[in-house]
Amino acid sequence: MTLAVRHLDAGYGRARVLSDVALEVAKGEVAVLLGRNGAGKSTTLKTIMGWVRAQRGEIVFDDRRIDRLPTWEIARSGLGYVPEDRRIFTDLSVIENLDVGRRGQGWTPEKLFALFPNLGEARERPAGRISGGEQQMLAIARCLMGNPTCILLDEPSEGLAPVIVDQLTAAVRELKSSGVAVLLSEQNWRFASAVADRAYVIEKGRIRFAGTMAELAADEAVRGRYLAV
């Protein structure tokens, strides 16, 4: 497995948010962490990246434990992260944002413009003057400029128009075919079911379901209990 989380407890101060969380994602695979707001999805990704300190358990990436490493070292090991709030540089142009993220060989601006054509058309435009959907694409593209072998996407489709979600779907499928491992947190069932191979359902900080996306699609009881609004 490219990324494996085992028996993970984590939280903020004395408040425990995650309890005994376990999940895996392999090279060229898309795994999705599904759950309602407040279920623990974002905290799981932040803990993997070292933004939240693990209280128990282990996180293994490319056969190396990373749960005690600083965030910068985790990122340098090849794990990319696109947080929910994107954190792009709004005063810099699209191409300048990509240059900020450049590290290593592999992804180039031209390859990313082929993956996200909207960005190619706006390459010289300030990032603060492109649409929300294009900003999400830019956040992902900037992360890819670091050439990660695994990328964590926190609620990537939230608030995006359906046509942009379709473009995002195509991009995630392309990442998968290129061998990148993808772990995303989501509430959008349509998007998740279109891209994911493996699914985990989290509720109150605990994994309530682990299996293939097809198995989850067939399990109406689990979806009704933990995912229905």
Image (tube, grey):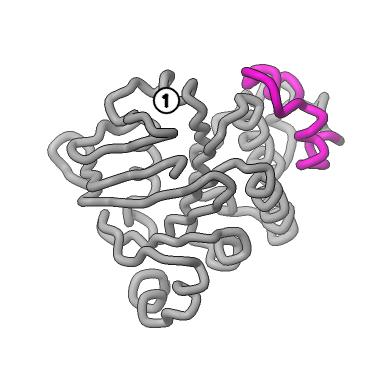
Residue that appears at 26% across and 31% down: 53
Give the vertical position of 132 relative to 81 (above or below): below
Residue that appears at 21% across and 44% down: 9
Q: Quadrant of residue 140?
A: top right
Secondary structure of the residue carrying tag 1 is helix
In the rendered image, the quadrant that contains the N terminus is top left
Give the vertical position of 19 relative to 10 (above or below): below
Q: Residues within 10 Å of mark 1 (few under 14, many from 20)?
A: some
Residue that appears at 48% across and 60% down: 198
Q: Is residue 83 visible?
A: yes
Judged left or right of residue 99, residue 208 is left
Q: Is residue 132 visible?
A: no
Q: From the top left corner, tell me how far across and down residue 68 is, in percent.
A: 27, 25
Judged left or right of residue 35, residue 91 is right
Look at the image and say whether residue 113 sits in the magenta stretch: yes
Give the vertical position of 36 relative to 58 (above or below): below
Give the vertical position of 107 relative to 154 (above or below): above
Q: Main secondary structure of the magenta part?
A: helix
Q: From the top left corner, tell me how far across and down residue 81 is, in percent.
A: 50, 35
Look at the image and say whether residue 37 sits in the magenta stretch: no
Residue segment shown in magenta: 95-120
Q: From the top left corner, tell me how far across and down residue 57 is, in percent.
A: 22, 40
Q: From the top left corner, tell me how far across and down residue 51 is, in percent.
A: 35, 30
Q: Quadrant of residue 117?
A: top right
Residue furthest out toward the right: 121
The residue where tag 1 is placed is 74
Residue in the foreground of this view, choosing between 144 and 43? 144
Residue that appears at 35% across and 70% down: 226
